[in-house]
Image (cartoon, grey):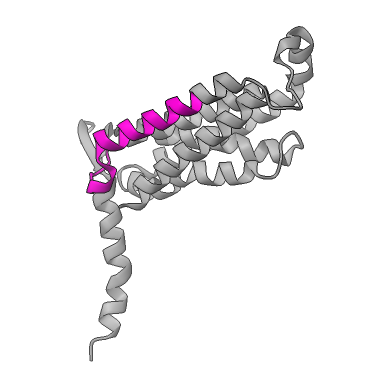
Amino acid sequence: MRRLQLSLVAAQLVGAATLLRSVAYDRWITVLAAALLIVGATAARRGRSWGVGLALGAAASFPVAWAIGIAPPWFCLVGIVGALPFAIASRAFARFDKGATALLAVLAASTGAISAIAWKEYAWSFFTTFPISQPSLEAQHGVALASLATLVVVAGVLARGKHGLAGGQRVRVAEQLRVGESTGREKDATLDLDLLDAEDDANSTAPQRRSRLP
């Protein structure tokens, strides 16, 4: 089971747990961020490169929210787990276009950070305009939470059976990339992140093997 696959599953699980907690306490802006994290990780597991960027952007909002004083410290853990897929995939992306990879990282992270800062600025005005959106101090929506939790479990089981996570299925990300500025042509490049992950492991162990030779 590859690192990228595991990181995407972890992002989905952390996003689902955060979403359920946020629904219970009427933290609707956190519900949105957690939902985007789940959508991004799910899209990436289906081979969509934009999903990795979306997951990074959603994840970036969590530690920033804690840093500016509007969220608990465990939001940092959500952000770290949510950013892992991009951290792992970025090396493969950079092999095709380092500039685009850096730009994606900056845009995604800054969008998440700006969103958290903007929410702190306008949250009270939003609550005043829409009092029903105010957070609660006690857990609510028991039936809705039970239904949502059941849906999450069923979706996870179906996804595991469909995509065969345990069967070593490769994660492929297909994108239209410009290959070679001199040619000016666009080619359909398929990024086999699972294969590149295996190559990185082989490269990291190669020096150790050579050092054992007489």
Which of the pair 207/180 is nearer the observer? Answer: 207
Part of the protein shown in magenta: 148-173
For this view, does 182 lie left or right of residue 4? Answer: left
For residue 27, side relative to residue 95 (left or right): right
Secondary structure character of the magenta stretch overall = helix
Residue at left offset 23%, top offset 44%: 169
- Please say whether residue 159 is one of the residues in the magenta stretch: yes
State which quadrant residue 202 falls in.
bottom left
Whether residue 166 is in magenta: the answer is yes
- Residue 39, x across and y down, in percent: 43, 28
Residue 19 lies, with reference to residue 129, above or below; the image says below
Tell me which residue sits at (37%, 28%) in the image. Answer: 155
Which part of the image, by quadrant, shows the C terminus? bottom left
- Left or right, 196 with respect to 122, comes to left
Taking the image as drawn, is residue 182 in sight? no
In the rendered image, the residue lying farthest to the top is 129
